[in-house]
Amino acid sequence: MKSDHLRLVAGTEFIHLEQTDAELFTLFSGWAFRYKELVDGRRQILNFALPGDLIGLQASLFDKALYGAIALTDVELCVIPRRRLFKLFERMPPLAFDVTWLGASGEAIVDENLLTAGRRNAAERIASLIATLYRRAETLDLVRNGVLDFPLTQQHIADALGLSLVHTNKTLARLKTLGLFSIRDGKLTLINRRAVSRLAQHFEKEPAPRPLL
């Protein structure tokens, strides 16, 4: 089903809002994110994509893309042409189930993000984002000796959590002072994992086996 393997530099937008011919992608390497934006430029990051994640399922099924997608780091993308998506369900049910599983998993992440933005305070929001991304990265063997390459800027964090940049900066500084985690030179170290989980009310469960496309 794969038709191409793309290599894009950080900052490249590979799905545009209201694009009518957006393809379906799986993220082979690197980080990306999906977002929506108001007319005045205020941006909401919907979720961050890590290797193995599916990007563009909605855009492939609907008439046009309902969000944009940007490479957060240099990325590699596997391309599955939208015109072949129906054949996937028709001819390869096991693979179609994997695609559906990845789509449902992405929806669950967005649901958790909605809970975070709607009910958690600033410290809980940041702790939840840190705990979730760290745990997801662990399952992909992206954490080395307790350290995760962490390409998010404070602006990315603010846009994902519905916080102002000033509030994000102050809250991050307070959490770092408490010794919960360290973010330095693009590296995240989780110093007190249990405390971060308690603050975020993010209680770890054994992750379900996931397909890798």
Image: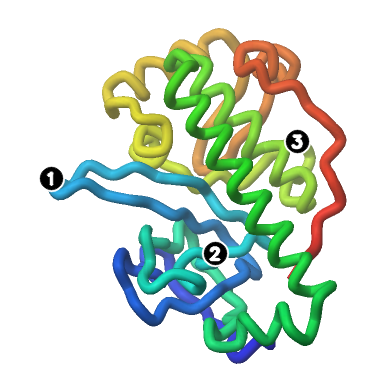
- Mark carried by residue 40: 1
* Residue in the picture at 54% in, 66% down: 57
Badge 1 marks a residue whose secondary structure is loop
Residues marked 1 and 2 touching at CB (< 8 Å): no
- Mark carried by residue 146: 3
* Residue in the picture at 69% in, 19% down: 197
Which numbered mark, 3 or 1, is in the foreground of this view? 1
* Residue 189 pos. (x, y %): 65, 31
The residue wearing badge 2 is 55
Badge 3 marks a residue whose secondary structure is loop
What amino acid type is highlighted by mark number 1? Asp
Residue 167 lies, with reference to residue 52, above or below; the image says: above
* Residue 48 pos. (x, y %): 52, 49
Q: How many marks?
A: 3
Alpha-carbon neighbours of circle 1 within 10 Å: few (<14), some, or many (≥20)? few
Badge 2 marks a residue whose secondary structure is strand
* Residue in the picture at 63% in, 42% down: 108
Along the horizontal axis of the image, is 108 left or right of 125?
right
In the current view of this chain or complex, which residue is farthest to the left? Answer: 40
In the current view of this chain or complex, which residue is farthest to the top? Answer: 178
Alpha-carbon neighbours of circle 2 within 10 Å: few (<14), some, or many (≥20)? many
Residue 153 lies, with reference to residue 91, above or below; the image says: above
How far apart marks 1 and 2 lie (CA) works out to 26 Å
What amino acid type is highlighted by mark number 2? Ile
